[in-house]
Structures are given as C-alpha cells and as structure tokens.
Amino acid sequence: MTHDKKTILFVDDEESILEVASEYFLQKDYHVITAVNGKDALTVLENTEVDCCFTDINMPGMDGLELAEHIREIDMTIPVIVMTGYPSLENTINTLKNGVVDFLIKPVNLEQMELCVRRVLMQRKVFEDNLLLKKELDSKKRIEALNIELLGKVDELNNLNKIMNDFEQVTSSRELFIRVVELARDITHADESRLFIISPTQEKPFQVTASSAKGSISHPIEPAVEALVLEIVEDGIPLLVSQCTGVKDLPERILSAMAVPLKIRDKVFGVVTAFVEDGNYRFDEKDLYYLSFMGTKAADTAENIALYETISENLFSTLRAFVKAVEARDAYTKEHSNRVAEMAVALGREMGCSEEELNLLNFAGRLHDIGKIGIRDNILLKPGRLTDEEFEIIKEHPVIGAMIVSQLGLWDRETQIIRHHHERFDGSGYPDGLKGVAIPFLSRIMSVADAYDAMASDRAYRKKLDLEKVSSIIRDGSGAQFDPRVVDTFFKLVESGRWNFV
C-alpha cells in the first residue's frame, strides 16, 4: 500500500458483515476496529483516533444517522459512509447533511468499499488542508459542496426508486401505457411525451397514448417525429437531439427531443418520446439515462402483464368450461351465469362502480355457480322441494366455488364475490351469515342479479315468473334479503325502461 496505515471503524449489528469487512481491509493493510452499535462506536472514538467510519443505518439503540451526528460533533473531519439496505432516503436528506459524505446500498461490494475509502480519505486530506489554510469560510464551502454532491445522488436514487415502485403497482396494459407517458414527463421535466406501438399488421408505428403539460395534444404527429420513431425501431438505440445540434430536422415547436425503444427479448415493440417545447431547459445525458431505465422497466412490466393476461385468460376459459358442464346438466339453467354477469354489470354501472369493479362483476358473475359442479345430480336436478339435508348440501356450492377459484391464487376479490353471493342483508344467509355492509358490496349486487334470473327463468321445479311478480318479491326482500340501495337501483332501471333482461 502507498498510503500511511489508516484506521477504519466499522459499525454494524450484523457480525458476519463485520467479520468479512475486517478480514478484507486487514489484508489491504488498514487498521480495523469494529462496533456492533452506535454506543459502542462512540466509546471507541473516545479512546482511538479514527480516519474513516462505515456505519449501517438501522441498528438498535442508536442508529447510523444519529451516530453520524455525534461523530460530526467530536471531529467534523472524520468521513462517515452510510450503508443501507433501503434505497429510498427521501426522509433523511436533512440528517445526511450532518457529516455523511457518501452512502452505499447493501449488499456492498468489498472492492467498491475500498475505492470509496480511498476517495473519502483523499477528500478528507484536502478538507483538512482547507481547514488549516482557509479556515472556517473555506471549510464551510467544502461541506456545502459535499452536501450538493450527496443531494444529487439522493435525487438520482429517488428517481430510479420512483420508476421501479410505480411499475410495481401496474396490473394492465392500458394502465401501463398511461403510466409510461406520465412518468416520462415527470422524471425528465418534459412538456410532452408519447408512446408508439409497433405492430406487424401496421405499416407505421401508431400512437396509443400521450401526456402533455398543456392537458391535451392538439397537433398531429409530424413527419419528422414519425421519422425519429422509425429510426429508433430500426436501430434499437436511445436517441437525444436538440434544435441547436442540427442533427435532426425537428419540428419548429420542439426544442429538445428524446426517444427510447421498448424491447421484449431484444425485439422493439414500442417507442417512448419526450419533447421540450418552451423555455430554456434542454434534455441532457442524465435525462436520457432516466428515460432509458424507465423504458427497460416498462418493457419488463409489459412482458409480465402479457404473460399474466395469457395465463389468466386460459384459466378463465378452463373455469368457464366447468360452468358450461354444470349448466349442461340442467337445461333450465343454461346461460344463467352469463345473464347474471350482464345484470350485475348493469346494476353496478348504474351505481357508479369503477371499470375495475365492473370487470370484477363480469368475471365473478360468469363463475358464481361453478361450485355446483360438486353437487350431486339427484339434488341439483331434483324437480320437487328439497329436504333440509339436501338444502344444506346445496348451500355448500358458494364455498366450493370460492375454493376452486382461490386455488389458482390469482383472483382474491372475485373469490370473495363468489363465496358471499348468497349472504342476506339481515344476516340470515350463507355460508358465513354476514350482515349488512359486512357483505362485500359487489356480492350484494350479485345477489340481486342472481335472484332475479333464478325467478325469471324456467327451473326444474317451476315455470318462470313474470316481471311484475319478480319485482314484487325483490321489493319485499329489500332490507331483509337484499341491500336496499341495490333494490332501488334495480327499480330505477326497470321504471326507466333500461332493464333489458325481461
């Protein structure tokens, strides 16, 4: 080693990390001292001169950030390097200003740690020289410079963390496309962002969504923008251009532009663009890095969603085949599940359900009686009145259906709708005797739709009832069997002539 033997203090409550770091730096000719928490570290500092300190953030008693503040009070020239397994440091920026010169994300590479040590020790020497030569004013400027550097790193880390977290919440292609353009504008401070999809059936890339700081985009896609997208499709390489570079013949409105490819297995399936239209701001290499990183994560998410949607569609098709098998056993209930799903969606739409909730109703409605596949024919198809024992067996079908769907591990909310569509508002239903709002809201909607179709259809044990009779029974069941709000919605649709299921 060409340096004087330096002393490094390692503070971490994981002894395995202390052992590995000690052995490595001892071999590199450093003097190493270890402590398992902040209090022990302060005891060391009272009796030993330390040149550099590595500390974990999360430790019992005194955490790493509190330790860093104490070290600053003892000797403000000792560089403190924080190690953390939690990359989001947004809430600790103000604390990091107090003596922390760098941070590393666990698991930490030992060679990276050594490079960090060399750099901060060199910085410390310069810092000490400044203290001696320039006194307090220059030392303050140096600290501010280190803080600016650190804040820059924190800002970069937060941007990358934001990208990863945002895409973790996305569950559909439509949601992904919207999030891509919104996030592209957010992380690059762009005025406009567009997403183009490449399709083998289309000669040109087509725009699927866009986001603008002005709220809406009124101008069409210019030939120069289209040419930029086609170049990215052909080359597969991110591109950054500005009017001042003269590299591209950009539309007059665009002062700076970026475009990055979205790839699945090295094949471009989309292109994200970002434009600056006003002001003095221009994109730089860091903006292109952020947009490219976002493009990679978006492409990974798109592939996962496509895989999930394919698996989900196949499983749903299999379950629908089971439902068809149940309905094939009883000619009277043929297409019952489809009609219940359509009725439930009509009720849900009138009650202001979101698109997600309407999709849940549609899905669960088509599978709500799948549990009847576990009921014997002599009970399921019995033309006469069921005995008490037989009815208890029939009452098992919501539980059986929920169990079948839940085993696939994909549809938790749908499973709840299926399990509870025979609960009653007064608590006398089955299988769990839930009462009032304890019954899932969408199950309460499904209950009215299921009951209506059961009464308005021919069954093995009776002929269908007319609308007037069915309506009377549903009205009488308001507050007892059914949620009054759903009943009111049913009559609103009937009285306005919008109940198209007579």
Image: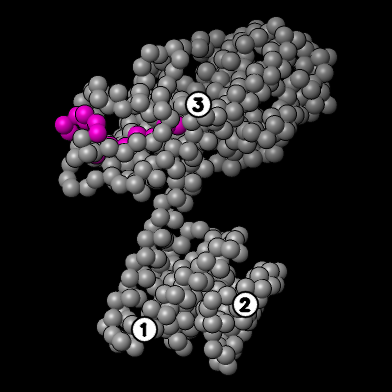
Which callout, 3 or 2, points to the residue nearer the camera? 2
Residue type at the position of mark 1: Asp
Q: Nearer the viewer, residue 409 or 144?
A: 144
Residue type at the position of mark 2: Asp
Q: Is residue 17 magenta?
A: no
Identify the residue at horizontal 82%, vertical 18% (top origin). 376
Identify the residue at horizontal 44%, vertical 43% (top origin). 293
The circle on residue 29 is: 2
Residue type at the position of mark 3: Lys
Q: From this viewpoint, is residue 62 visible?
A: no
The circle on residue 267 is: 3
Q: Which residue is mark 1?
A: 129
Q: Residues within 10 Å of mark 3 (few under 14, many from 20)?
A: few
Marks 3/1: CA–CA distance? 55 Å
What span is in magenta? 247-262
Q: Is residue 207 above or below residue 118?
A: above
Mark before the other along the chain sequence, 1 or 2: 2
